[in-house]
């Protein structure tokens, strides 16, 4: 999860629903999105006056309640628009439901819908179950910036002192303390396994999420690093704790390298799960190309995508002032849009009409910081023990691109462990393709052998 925008082509599945004379209710269909992947989609329709409103669920991805922009029923046909996904479904009403075509990003996918009584759920068998065999405390920490950070501390029931403590730091984008994604709760799972092994674990809501406050449009990774430092310092005040490490996923791993080198007293060890070690624009360029290739984007469109992205990244890096950056990006994309066909615009994710919302998303201060920050020098300076893990099927933080710094320029330490898990994706699930749509389909939250390695390495500190 990076705070991505940058014309990333993601066919994450969306679809439509059916009806006959009375369409209120739930309608489900199967959407074949390629590579043998079939995703269930459910439209929840509710009568509102003379028309209908509704939401879309993708239970196999754990994406629920996506609002429908419009629902139109006329002359035996159904038209549904989902503007946030730049998608549309058009179908003909039949005695058995609806038969039609779902359109998104230049793709036309057949979709039939039939009425159901209940939205299907997907199992998450690794979720910790009550009663939990350890202590659970809700905490609120006053951060150095004046805001509050709310979290959960888990401790062994018989904890009296000399415990290892770990602070969990989430990937980019606003996350809750469990780092919930597609109904997976990887941080809750990691905390559970570590605490059962005798480790105290503190996980917390990001700024502006849950019980935490302080989110602003000017926040960058450096600000989130301040939060991680404050949580680590708070954990050190607990009488049960003798040492504190940081476990970070994605941007959380980057934050770990920042703290370990800029404020070495903050943490005693680092677990970096898919942590970037190259500059943000290089990382995103690879990420977008891998995702688009995996989605079988036509070669000529992919070439255009790569060219447009790199020029957009250069524009973002060039302008430190947000207003100047936004104006330059708007001019750039307006010129690009004039040169593209409607189908290429759809493939690249450039919307018809007003480009301002997209440009504002790309102009946030976080994006400029991320595009210009190079973590490699920090990796070279690491002196504390590091466990750096990467997924061989990770399309968001490519293993080969990012493991290199840890293997070639990081200072050697007898306790370092640098490892690529060949079948793991960005969430460290055992995966088939590594594509984002797969995250929610898989019932596994995190591969057991990865969890075992984390527990073994941390408890050895």
Image (spheres, rainbow, N blue to C red):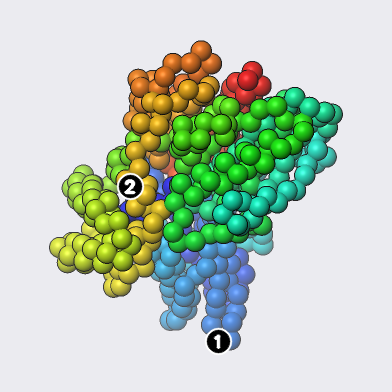
Answer with left or right where residue 47 lies relative to residue 358: right
What residue sits 67% from the left and 41% below the top? 234
User: Residues under labels 2 and 1: Cα distance?
Assistant: 49 Å
Answer with left or right where residue 405 lies relative to residue 185: left
CB under 8 Å between callouts 2 and 1? no
Crowd tier of the residue under label 1, counting other residues whose Cα lies within 10 Å: few below 14, some 14–19, many 20 or above: few
Q: Is residue 366 above or below residue 197?
A: below
Q: Which of 256 and 430 is in front in this view?
A: 256
Q: In this view, does 54 lie above or below 33?
A: below
Q: Where is residue 183 in the image (x, y as percent from the top left)?
A: 61, 48
Crowd tier of the residue under label 2, counting other residues whose Cα lies within 10 Å: few below 14, some 14–19, many 20 or above: many
Q: Residue 431 carries which label?
A: none
Q: Where is residue 345 in the image (x, y as percent from the top left)?
A: 25, 61
The tag earlier along the polypeptide, 2 or 1, is 1
To which residue does mark 2 refer? 371
Q: Position of residue 438 (x, y in %)?
A: 48, 42
To which residue does mark 1 refer? 50
Mark 1 lies on a secondary structure that is loop
Residue at the outermost left position: 339
Residue 410 seen anywhere in this rendered image of the structure = yes
What residue sits 45% from the left and 26% below the top? 382
Q: Is residue 33 above or below residue 399?
A: below
């Amino acid at each position: 999860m990076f705070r991505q925008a940058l014309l990333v082509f993601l066919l994450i599945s969306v679809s439509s629903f059916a009806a006959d004379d009375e369409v209120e209710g739930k309608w489900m269909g199967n959407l074949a999105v390629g590579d043998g992947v079939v995703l269930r989609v459910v439209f929840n329709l509710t009568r509102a006056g003379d028309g209908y409103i509704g939401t879309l669920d993708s239970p196999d991805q754990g994406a629920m309640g996506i609002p429908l922009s419009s629902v139109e029923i006329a002359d035996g046909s159904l038209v549904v628009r989902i503007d946030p996904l730049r998608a549309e479904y058009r179908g003909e009403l039949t005695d058995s439901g609806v038969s039609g075509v779902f359109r998104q990003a230049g793709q036309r996918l057949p979709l039939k819908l039939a009425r159901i009584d209940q939205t299907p759920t997907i199992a998450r068998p690794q979720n910790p179950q009550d009663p939990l065999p350890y202590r659970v405390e809700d905490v609120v920490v006053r951060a150095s910036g004046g805001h509050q950070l709310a979290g959960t501390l888990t401790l062994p029931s018989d904890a009296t002192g000399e415990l290892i403590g770990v602070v969990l730091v989430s990937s980019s984008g606003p996350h809750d303390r469990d780092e919930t994604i597609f109904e997976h709760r990887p941080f809750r799972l990691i905390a559970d396994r570590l605490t059962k092994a005798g480790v105290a674990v503190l996980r917390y809501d990001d700024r502006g999420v849950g019980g935490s406050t302080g989110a602003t449009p000017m926040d960058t990774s450096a600000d989130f690093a301040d939060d991680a430092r404050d949580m680590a310092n708070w954990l050190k005040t607990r009488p049960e704790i003798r040492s504190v490490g940081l476990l970070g996923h994605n941007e959380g791993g980057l934050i770990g390298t920042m703290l370990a080198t800029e404020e070495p007293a903050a943490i005693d060890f680092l677990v970096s799960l898919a942590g970037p070690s190259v500059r943000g624009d290089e990382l995103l360029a690879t990420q977008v190309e891998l995702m688009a290739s995996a989605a079988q984007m036509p070669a000529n469109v992919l070439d255009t995508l790569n060219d447009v992205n790199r020029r957009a990244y250069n524009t973002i890096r060039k302008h430190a002032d947000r207003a100047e950056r936004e104006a330059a990006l708007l001019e750039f994309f307006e010129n690009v849009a004039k040169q593209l066909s409607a189908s290429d615009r759809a493939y690249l994710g450039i919307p018809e009409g007003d480009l301002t919302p997209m440009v504002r998303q790309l102009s946030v201060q976080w994006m400029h910081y991320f595009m210009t920050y190079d973590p490699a020098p920090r990796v070279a300076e690491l002196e504390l023990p590091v466990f750096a893990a990467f997924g061989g099927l990770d399309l968001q933080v490519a293993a080969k691109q990012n493991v290199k710094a840890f293997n070639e320029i990081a200072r050697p330490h007898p306790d370092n462990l640098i490892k690529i898990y060949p079948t793991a994706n960005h969430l460290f699930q055992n995966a088939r393709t590594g594509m984002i749509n797969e995250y929610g389909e898989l019932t596994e939250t995190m591969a057991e052998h990865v969890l075992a390695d984390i527990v073994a390495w941390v408890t050895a500190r």
